[in-house]
Image: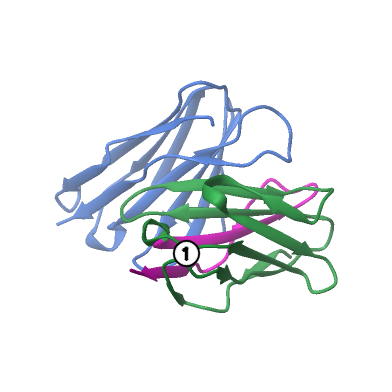
Chain colours: A blue, B green
Amino acid sequence: GAVVSQHPSRVICKSGTSVKIECRSLDFQATTMFWYRQFPKQSLMLMATSNEGSKATYEQGVEKDKFLINHASLTLSTLTVTSAHPEDSSFYICSARPGLASTGELFFGEGSRLTVL
Amino acid sequence: AQSVAQPEDQVNVAEGNPLTVKCTYSVSGNPYLFWYVQYPNRGLQFLLKYITGDNLVKGSYGFEAEFNKSQTSFHLKKPSALVSDSALYFCAVRSTGFQKLVFGTGTRLLVSP
């Protein structure tokens, strides 16, 4: 299947700093990528839809200025957690779908665990 | 609105026995249904999907799922469980015309030796 790479897999930062997480589609182009957040023992919460060359679409309740998303190319989307606080600690997962077919499955990155001290 | 329900937080089964992980859904149009598996501190791995056609879908690692339109269910099954199947399983749904994939709350499968 298609491969989505996510980096870093783990990051620890101090409160008030910013952290960038990268999501790359390695063997396909993705005009759309999705960013999810997963709390311990809970399901995935869609944060935003990242669109190549345009602004991301954020889900209700997700702060646009806190979670900056940039989709600069067809293979790369980045999520920047700005001025991180301990409550931002979580597991962040990106996903993408190859091709234009809406019936295709999503492929997920390995996730990034963010710990804010 | 789209929604998915996984009524069981955890399913316990002995190795070699058949397993079933339940999923029901609600969508306004035709459903696209998916099952994913997640191992600790890892991303999600695609298992199988139902788009159209045969109601019994076969996927990776010997898993299969049956689409039942009248019961709006898409239960995941495997004839003989392995200890290595122990993981967190997510059912997801998307309806035609929508990009967003909605996930259930997940079911933890524990297969004992």
Task: Point out the stretch of residues depicted in magenta.
Answer: B86-113
Task: Pinpoint residue B14: horizontal percent, then vertical percent.
Answer: 42, 73
Out of A115 and A83, give the one closest to the viewer.
A115
Residue at x 49%, y 59% (from the top left corner):
A45
> How many numbered callouts?
1
Q: Amino acid at mark 1?
A: Ser
Residue at x-position 74% and y-position 33%: A101
Residue A55 highlighted magenta (yes or no):
no
Q: Chain of mark 1?
A: A
> Is B72 or B29 nearer to us in this picture?
B72
Where in the figure is residue B44, as x and y percent of width and height? 46, 49
The residue tagged 1 is A43
Q: Residue at x 50, y 67 (%)?
A: B106
Vertical comparison of A112 with B5: above or below: above
- Where does the image place residue B92, in percent across and percent down from the top left? 62, 58
Quadrant position of the C terminus of chain B in the picture: bottom left
The reply, left or right, for residue B50 in relation to residue A23 is right
Residue at figure coordinates x 61%, y 28% from the top left: A31
